[in-house]
Image: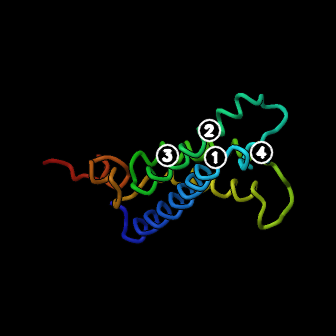
Amino acid sequence: MKPLFENVALLLARLTLGLGFGLAGLDTVRKSLDPAANAFAVKFRPDWIPANIFEAYGKTLPWLELGIGALIILGLFTRIGGVLLFLLLTFHCITAFDATPSTGNAFLQAATLAAFGLVIALTGSGAWSLEARMGGGKGEKSSSEKPAKK
């Protein structure tokens, strides 16, 4: 089992990342209800992506953000959620590339969250998660940590 501080850090990381991503999805859902005010499609659509593909992506994105955020908060399918988060934000980085070093730079924020998602995907959910309670995840002892039978 992981030490206490590692489990606390994983819990705080999951809560922070999941809440941030889930709240972003909730905000996007709220904004997508008014198509005229959908700044996402206007701001982030590059010319090389066909409009119909980007429109489908834009309609699916908020629900993915909400779902992935919930999975990460609960610690359920955390590795899959972390990989999906990484892939979504990598695509966002590709479409919103801006090399300016400002604090409001969407590219830098997305790149930071993408790296955070990859770390969660590689480390797992920790002991304080639904995965650990259900007998899976990295919060439980692996077979190599169990004492050998005599």
Above or below 89: residue 5? below
Q: Are marks 1 and 2 in contact (CB under 8 Å)?
A: yes
Label 3 sits on a secondary structure element that is helix
Q: Secondary structure at mark 2?
A: helix
Calculate the distance from the C-alpha at mark 2 to the C-alpha at mark 3: 19 Å
Q: Are marks 4 and 3 in contact (CB under 8 Å)?
A: no
Q: Residues within 10 Å of mark 1 (few under 14, many from 20)?
A: some
Mark 1 and mark 4: Cα distance apart in space: 14 Å
**Which dot, 2 or 3, sits closer to the camera?**
2
- The residue identified by callout 2 is 59
- Name the residue carrying label 4: 44
Q: Is residue 132 left or right of residue 114?
A: left
Label 1 or label 2, whichever comes before in sequence order: 1
In front: label 4 or label 3: 4
Going by the numbered disc 3, the residue's amino acid type is Gly
Residue for point 67% across, 58% down: 112
Q: CA distance from mark 4 to mark 3?
A: 23 Å
Q: Reading the chain from its start, which is encountered first: label 2 or label 3?
A: 2
Q: Which residue is mark 1?
A: 32
Amino acid marked by disc 2: Lys
**Dots 3, 1 in contact, CB < 8 A:** no
Q: Which callout, 3 or 1, points at the residue further toward the start of the chain?
A: 1
